[in-house]
Image: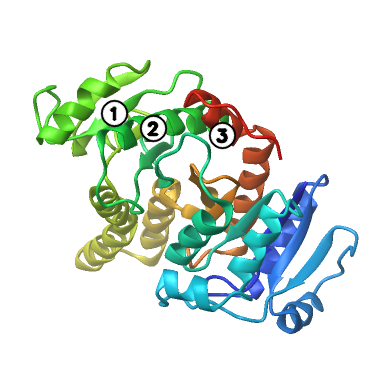
């Protein structure tokens, strides 16, 4: 299996992507990696390592898409960027997945434009992994589609259940519709219609409220991208806010150094499930390929885990199972 890794994406390229790739090669002996990006800076970074030229390759992509560039413009104007060339190699079957911590909007736009959509999928989506008191939950949509139709929710529910089953190992994942109340008649006219449609699916647990998210009541949380992204960013802020509150309280109580260290250690272990490094990244669901996006500030560990997740996604044939679930047949390569 060959996985392409964007070596010029994110806040800490090429150092973090290259190190993450090297760690993934050690953990997964059955994969090869293609680093995409400006060849000169990649080779300079690789001088720090002893690398196997049979398993690690370079695809020169001299142009870099910045984190603040307009996605559609960047994809059209920078055809020699790491994202465009990496996804192009994927489309041409020279690799089975593409991994990037670069501009999320550009990556999504390029993935849809270059790879296309899976048969039967109306809209690809981006999901996010949220920690709960029970286990990880999948939040769909996390910001790609601000407005949805009933059929979109329905397809997202199917794709989310498959991902939870194949990647998280949940045998019978439950799905909840994020709403303002648990009763079927709650919410907008659209959400009421969505509720009736989702009742056709096995594992639909009904409406859930904000208080249910981190309790782990369901495995897949459905929302439009507007609310989903707000929930995601709110969740990401929790550890930092509590750390500031904790520091303030320890200062007010005038704790001794040993006591402060004990409290900080306890706090860090408590909030460790919120650490994105453990998840790494997640593929765009519904794209006709495996395009994995990660946090712009990803560490080498996070990038290594992104590569591991991409390999698992390919091995489990998640896309094939999505197409089958949506009532279509897979087109031969």
Q: Which SS class for mark 1?
A: strand
Can you say whether 309 is above or below 322 in the image?
below
Q: Residue visible at 49% across and 68% down? A: 297
Vertical placement of residue 197 versus 286, above or below: above
The disc, 1 or 3, on the residue closer to the chain's N-terminal end is: 3
> Is label 2 or label 1 in front?
2
Check if mark 2's residue and mark 1's residue have beta carbons within 8 Å. no
**Residue depicted at x 70% and y 66%:** 19
Q: Quadrant of residue 204?
A: top left
Compared to residue 120, the image places residue 11 above or below, namely below
Which class describes the residues within 10 Å of circle 1: few (<14), some (14-19), or many (20+)?
A: many
**Secondary structure type for disc 3:** loop
Which of marks 1 and 2 precedes in the sequence?
Answer: 2
Q: Label 1, on which residue?
A: 176
Q: Position of residue 31 (x, y in %)?
A: 79, 49
Instruction: Give the CA distance from mark 2 to mark 1.
Output: 14 Å
Q: Residues within 10 Å of mark 3 (few under 14, many from 20)?
A: some
All told, the count of numbered labels is 3
Distance between the alpha carbons at the discs numbered 2 and 3: 18 Å
Asked whether, in this view, residue 29 is left or right of residue 95, the answer is right
Residue at image location 12% in from the left, 30% down from the top: 181
Quarter of image, res 312: top right
Q: Nearer the viewer, residue 105 or 295?
A: 105
Residue that carries the numbered disc 3 in the rendered image: 167
Label 2 vs label 3, nearer the camera: 2
Marked residue nearer the N-terminal end (2 or 3): 2
Task: Check disc 2 and report the residue beneath it.
Answer: 155
Q: Viewed as shown, does residue 60 lie left or right of 8?
A: right
- Secondary structure beneath label 2: helix
């Amino acid at each position: 299996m060959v996985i392409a890794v964007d070596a010029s994406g994110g806040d800490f390229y090429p150092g973090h992507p290259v190190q993450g790739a090297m760690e993934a090669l050690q953990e997964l002996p059955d994969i090869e990696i293609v680093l995409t990006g400006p060849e000169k800076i990649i080779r300079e970074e690789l001088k720090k390592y002893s690398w196997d030229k049979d398993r690690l390759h370079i695809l020169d992509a001299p142009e870099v898409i910045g984190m603040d560039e307009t996605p559609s413009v960047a994809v059209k104007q920078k055809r020699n960027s790491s994202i465009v060339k990496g996804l192009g190699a994927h489309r041409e079957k020279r690799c089975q997945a593409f991994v990037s911590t670069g501009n999320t909007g550009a990556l999504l736009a390029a993935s849809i434009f270059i790879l296309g959509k899976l048969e039967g999928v109306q809209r690809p989506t981006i999901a996010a992994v949220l920690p709960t008191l029970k286990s990880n939950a999948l939040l769909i949509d996390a910001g790609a589609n601000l407005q949805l139709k009933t059929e979109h929710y329905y397809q997202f529910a199917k794709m989310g259940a498959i991902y939870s089953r194949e990647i998280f190992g949940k045998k019978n994942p439950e799905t909840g519709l994020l709403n303002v109340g648990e009763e079927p008649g709650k919410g907008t006219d659209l959400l009421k219609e969505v509720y009736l449609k989702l009742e056709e699916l096995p594992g639909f647990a009904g409406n859930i409220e904000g208080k249910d998210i981190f309790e782990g009541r369901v495995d897949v949380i459905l929302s439009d991208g507007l609310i989903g992204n707000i929930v995601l960013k709110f969740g990401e802020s929790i550890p930092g806010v509590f750390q500031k509150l904790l520091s303030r309280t320890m200062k007010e109580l005038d704790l001794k150094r040993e006591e402060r260290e004990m409290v900080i250690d306890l706090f860090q272990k408590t909030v460790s499930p919120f650490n994105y490094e453990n998840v790494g990244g997640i593929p765009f669901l519904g794209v006709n390929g495996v395009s994995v996006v990660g946090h712009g500030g990803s560490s080498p560990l996070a990038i290594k885990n992104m590569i591991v997740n991409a390999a698992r996604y390919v091995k489990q044939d998640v896309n094939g199972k999505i197409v089958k679930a949506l009532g279509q047949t897979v087109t031969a390569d």
